[in-house]
Image (tube, rainbow, N blue to C red):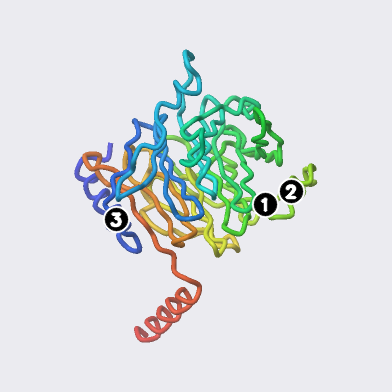
Amino acid sequence: MFGKCWMAVCLVCLAASTAAGMHDLGIVVPEPGLYRFTALSADAAGTLYAFEGDTLYRLDGGAFQTEVANLESAVWPGQQMTIDPSGFAVAPSGLTAYVATGMTGRLVEVDIDSASGTYGTARELTGAAMPSGANYGLAVDPLTGGVYLTDSYAADLYAVDTSGMGALVQVRAFAGGMFGSGIGFSPAGDLVVPVATGFAPWPTDDAYPVDLWRFGRDVFDSLAGGSVPADPGDAFATGLMVSGTAFTAVDAEGNVYLQAADGIYRVDPSGALSVLAGDTTQNVFSDCVGLGFMGLAYDPAGDRLLFAYRDAATDPWTLHEHVLPEPATLGLLGLGLVVAARRRR
């Protein structure tokens, strides 16, 4: 409704705005179907994995190679079951991967240990099926390998017992939570859970409020001891207005990154919101269908963010990196800005 000329200008602006701090690695990311996405996850060594449709890929030799394919038929032979992946996480060891199936609410465990006798096998953790029927966020504790999952409808947080057929233990129900989104652990083992507290009214407005909750090691120590702590977690940022939280990553300094189709937001440990990349003034409903940003993973070995991006539907999705500056570098950058501002006076 904005016209082809306006759209062309918009896409040019989007491409220009993402150039700063981003580097296109020129690696094609498996393309998802319309209104779906390809998820990314990195292990502790920095090996990157992707999940699209019902296929798991590993980045090897400068390209994504099929690791395990046809999971739907392997896990549910003869059944009508669809994986619409909402969450994907690889254990820090790089030996096991987990897939949240989205609107079917199941959790799948995949053996990706090439040295094991069961390499490539997958199973549903039937006891970890989401009670509401749909799941979204998925993350693995980098210190213990524990698995955590959120509800698609309320963002409620669950710990997953992966032994046997699996089980769910509710860690927290969020009052006022509207829907789930991606969740992420920091390398130090703190978990960040975005909780949307309102909707973005399609198609006129793509901004909605979100609270960020942080769960520290005291919570996970209690869970490991067999008890759920009373009133766990800390809402360290509330009422942030964003256009999306499809995936969440947390770096070594505790900065949180929220991915929307039109950009990547950064929230520092004090809760201050800024835009790391992209043009979040766009409307994701009309300007970013099949375009923009997709998938988000933090590589702890390289201290960088990895994600897919494209600004034209005729182009492939390609892997991009954003190398995160160290605190000392950030300080120098800040000093440089102060000096530059003084010179301009």
Residue 310 position, x and y percent, is 29, 46
Q: Pointer 1: residues within 10 angstroms few (<14), some, or many (20+)?
A: some
Q: Which residue is mark 2?
A: 232
Q: Which mark is residue 93?
A: none
Closer to us: mark 2 or mark 3?
A: 3
Relative height, residue 34 to residue 272 (above, below): above
Residue at point 34%, 83% (across, down): 344
Mark 1 touches mark 2? (CB < 8 Å) = yes
Residue at point 42%, 36% (across, down): 56
Mark 3 touches mark 1? (CB < 8 Å) = no
Q: Amino acid at mark 1?
A: Phe
Q: Of the residues under marks 3 and 1, which one precedes in the sequence?
A: 3
Q: Residue furthest left?
A: 5
Q: Pointer 2: residues within 10 angstroms few (<14), some, or many (20+)?
A: some
Q: Nearer the viewer, residue 272 or 290?
A: 290
Left/right placement of residue 23 relative to residue 333 reads: left
Q: Of the residues under marks 1 and 2, which one precedes in the sequence?
A: 1
Specify the quadrant of the image occupied by residue 288.
Answer: top left
Q: Which residue is mark 3?
A: 24
Q: Which mark is residue 215?
A: 1
Relative height, residue 212 to residue 180 (above, below): below
Q: Amino acid at mark 2?
A: Pro
Residue at point 71%, 41% (across, down): 171
Residue 278 position, x and y percent, is 36, 54
Task: Measure how far apart labels 1 and 2 are at the Cα level.
Answer: 7 Å
Q: Nearer the viewer, residue 119 or 271?
A: 119
